[in-house]
Amino acid sequence: MTPDRAALSGPALRLAPRLLGARLVSELAGQRVVVRLTEVEAYEGADDPASHAFRGPTGRTSVMFGPPGHLYCYFTYGMHWCANVVCGSDGVAAAVLLRAGEVVEGAEAAWARRPACRAERDLARGPARLATCLGLGAATNGADLCSPSSPVRLESVPRRRPRGVAVGPRIGISVATERPWRFWLDGDPTVSAYKPGRPTRQTL
DNA sequence: AGGACGATTAACT
DNA sequence: GTTAATCGTCCTC
C-alpha cells in the first residue's frame, strides 16, 4: 500500500465523521459540561505533513503514539489549549482534532470558563474555545475517554457516520491544505467559519 | 543558544 | 478586513 493510500484509509479519517453528534462529557472541579460535537478534523501520522506526529514521537506528542481512546491536549500560540481523540493503534499515530460543538449540558459552568463569550452558540465554536469551556488542558492530557471513571469521556459514538456530514479542507494549517479532512454537520450554527491557513513563508 | 512558528482568539479599523 | 497577544516546541546552527 502506498503511503498516500494508507493515509486515505487511516484511523483518523475513519473515526472523524463518526464523532459528529457524539458527546464529550467533562466532570472537573465538580462541574459537569457536555458538548455535542459538530466539527472535527483528521490528522494521520507519518503520511500527513500537517500532523504533529509527522516527524515521529516527541515529548509533546507522546500521547498520540500511545493507545487509542485517549485525549491528546496541546498548547499553542502561547495561550490556547486544543484537544484531540487519539485513534491509531500498534505504533500508528493518528488523532481527531475536536474543532467545535454545542454545549448541551452545564452551560453555566461553560460560561464561567469563557467570560469573554457573547453568544451561547460560540461557547464551543472553535478548537480552543471547546477545550476551554470543557476545562481541558495539561491536566487532562492522556485522559482515558472510554473509562466510566474518567473525568473526561466520549459517549454515544455511533457505529456508522451520521447523515448530513459535510467535508472540506482543514483550517489553520500551512501544508497539505488540499486534503479534505475536515468534517462537520452541515448547517449547524456551532460550526466555525472557514478560514484558510496561511501558507508557509517562502524563502526568497 | 537562538529563532521561527504555530491544528487560535479577541479586539481592533 | 487586520493585528496583537504570548510561550512551548522544535529545528538549525
Image (cartoon, coloured by chain):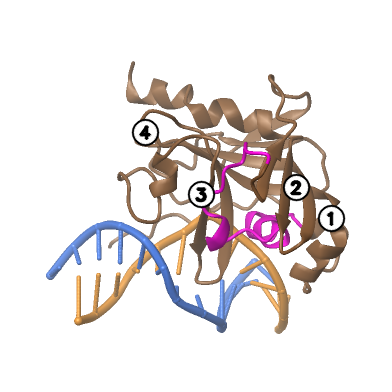
Chain colours: A brown, B orange, C blue
Query: Do the residues bearing badges 2 and 3 touch, measured as CB atoms within 8 Å?
Result: no
C-alpha distance separating marks 4 and 2 = 28 Å
> In the image, which is nearer the foreground, mark 3 or mark 4?
3
Three-letter residue code for mark 3: Gly
C-alpha distance separating marks 2 and 3 = 21 Å
Query: Do the residues bearing badges 4 and 2 touch, measured as CB atoms within 8 Å?
Result: no
Residue A68 falls within the magenta-colored stretch: no
Q: Nearer the viewer, residue C4 or A75?
A: A75
The answer to whether tags 1 and 2 share a subunit is: yes
x and y, in percent, of residue A111 in the image = 82, 66
x and y, in percent, of residue A133 in the image = 73, 61
Magenta stretch?
A: A124-148
Q: Earlier in the sequence, mark 2 or mark 3?
A: 2
Tell me if A64 is positioned left or right of A140 in this view: left
Three-letter residue code for mark 1: Arg
Quarter where residue A149 is shown: top right
Residue at screen point 70% across, 23% down:
A161
x and y, in percent, of residue A29 in the image = 72, 64
Task: Identify the residue under disc 3.
Answer: A142
Residue A144 falls within the magenta-colored stretch: yes
Three-letter residue code for mark 2: Gly
C-alpha distance separating marks 3 and 4 = 23 Å
Q: Nearer the viewer, residue A9 or A63?
A: A63
The disc numbered 4 marks a residue on which chain?
A
The kind of secondary structure element at disc 3 is: loop
